[in-house]
Image (spheres, rainbow, N blue to C red):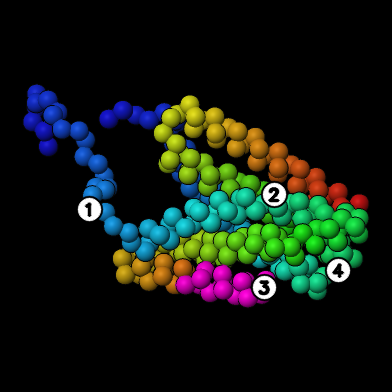
């Protein structure tokens, strides 16, 4: 605490203190939740476009299907699928944490690890299915 | 400490709506995922797809899906922008632009969902 009348000579301390910071798995899980969420938002227009094509004329349907099967389409589907699985699983984890389940440091780390592993497995599975 | 710009007392409602739409999406999101899987793999041809989409329940779920996605995505991006964009002017402009874009996309999507099959 500062004494009465004294002037502040130091800047406010930064919190967290960046120099002693290091990466923890729950931080990676949290950041990946945001990253995958943004990837999914970018996928929404793509999904809309595909839906628009698939509900159009038979030619539109074939064109949309061809694009989904093209290398670019497969890559988009792979990224979106992996992001969806991750965001879905980590979302359940966040809801559980909000409900007060698994709040201990150990459980947070374990559940983050599990969610990341599930996403890795999904990425491999989708990669195998799409190529 | 200088108070940051922004209205007070709206944090809880962001938090609350983010969780509420998350629960809704938890149930609904597997449906469009399976739909895309079906079309991609060729299990569903266009007739089968249109039969599915034409159903009233499909329209109802799509409507719920659109509203939940737009609200969930809007709050999510808003929170990210609030965390990383320091300038209040830029932040407000970005969030406003996002709100307009997302509402427009949501309305267009709703129109698409209720139009097909006719």
> Can you give x and y, in whole percent of width and height, for residue B93 in the image?
54, 29
Q: CA distance from mark 4 to mark 3?
A: 21 Å
Q: Nearer the viewer, mark 2 or mark 3?
A: 3
Q: Which residues are magenta?
A: A117-131
- Please indicate, yes or no, whether residue A98 appears anywhere in the rendered image: no
**Label disc, if present, on residue A20 of the rendered structure:** 1
Residue density around tag 4, few if under 14, some if 14–19, many if 20 or more, within 10 Å: some
> Can you give x and y, in whole percent of width and height, for residue A73 in the image?
70, 60
**Residue positioned 21% across, 35% down in the render:** A12
Main SS, magenta region, reads: helix
Is B113 above or below relative to A88? above
User: Do labels 3 and 1 touch, CB within 8 Å?
Assistant: no
**Residue positioned 11% across, 33% down in the render:** A2
**Residue positioned 65% across, 41% down in the render:** B102
Q: Is residue A119 left or right of residue A129?
A: left
Could you tell me which quadrant the N terminus of chain B lies in?
top left
Q: Secondary structure at mark 3?
A: loop
Q: Nearer the viewer, mark 4 or mark 3?
A: 3
Q: Quadrant of residue B100?
A: top right
User: Do labels 4 and 3 touch, CB within 8 Å?
Assistant: no
Residue at mark 4: B45
Q: Nearer the viewer, mark 3 or mark 1?
A: 3
Residue density around tag 3, few if under 14, some if 14–19, many if 20 or more, within 10 Å: few
> Can you give x and y, in whole percent of width and height, for residue B39 in the image?
78, 67
- Discs 1 and 2 share one subunit: yes
Residue at mark 2: A45
């Amino acid at each position: 605490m500062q004494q009465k009348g004294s002037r502040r000579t130091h800047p406010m301390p930064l919190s967290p203190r960046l120099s002693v910071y290091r990466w923890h798995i729950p931080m990676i899980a949290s950041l990946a939740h945001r990253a995958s969420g943004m990837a999914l938002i970018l996928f929404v227009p793509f999904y809309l476009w595909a839906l628009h094509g698939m509900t159009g004329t038979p030619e539109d349907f074939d064109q949309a299907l061809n694009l989904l099967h093209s290398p670019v389409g497969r890559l988009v589907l792979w990224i979106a699928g992996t992001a969806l699985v991750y965001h879905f699983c980590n979302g359940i984890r966040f809801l559980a944490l909000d409900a007060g389940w698994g709040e201990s440091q150990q459980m947070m780390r374990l559940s983050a690890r599990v969610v990341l592993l599930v996403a890795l497995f999904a990425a491999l599975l989708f990669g195998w299915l799409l190529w | 400490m200088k108070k940051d710009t922004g209205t007070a007392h709206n944090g809880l409602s962001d938090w609350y709506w983010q969780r509420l739409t998350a629960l809704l999406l938890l149930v609904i999101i597997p449906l469009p995922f399976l739909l895309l899987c079906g079309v991609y793999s060729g299990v569903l041809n266009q007739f089968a797809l249109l039969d599915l989409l034409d159903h009233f329940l499909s329209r109802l779920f799509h409507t719920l899906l659109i509203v939940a996605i737009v609200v969930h995505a809007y709050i999510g991006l808003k929170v990210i922008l609030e965390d990383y964009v320091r300038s209040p002017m830029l932040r407000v402009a970005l969030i406003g632009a996002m709100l307009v874009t997302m509402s427009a996309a949501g309305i267009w999507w709703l129109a698409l969902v209720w139009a097909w099959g006719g």
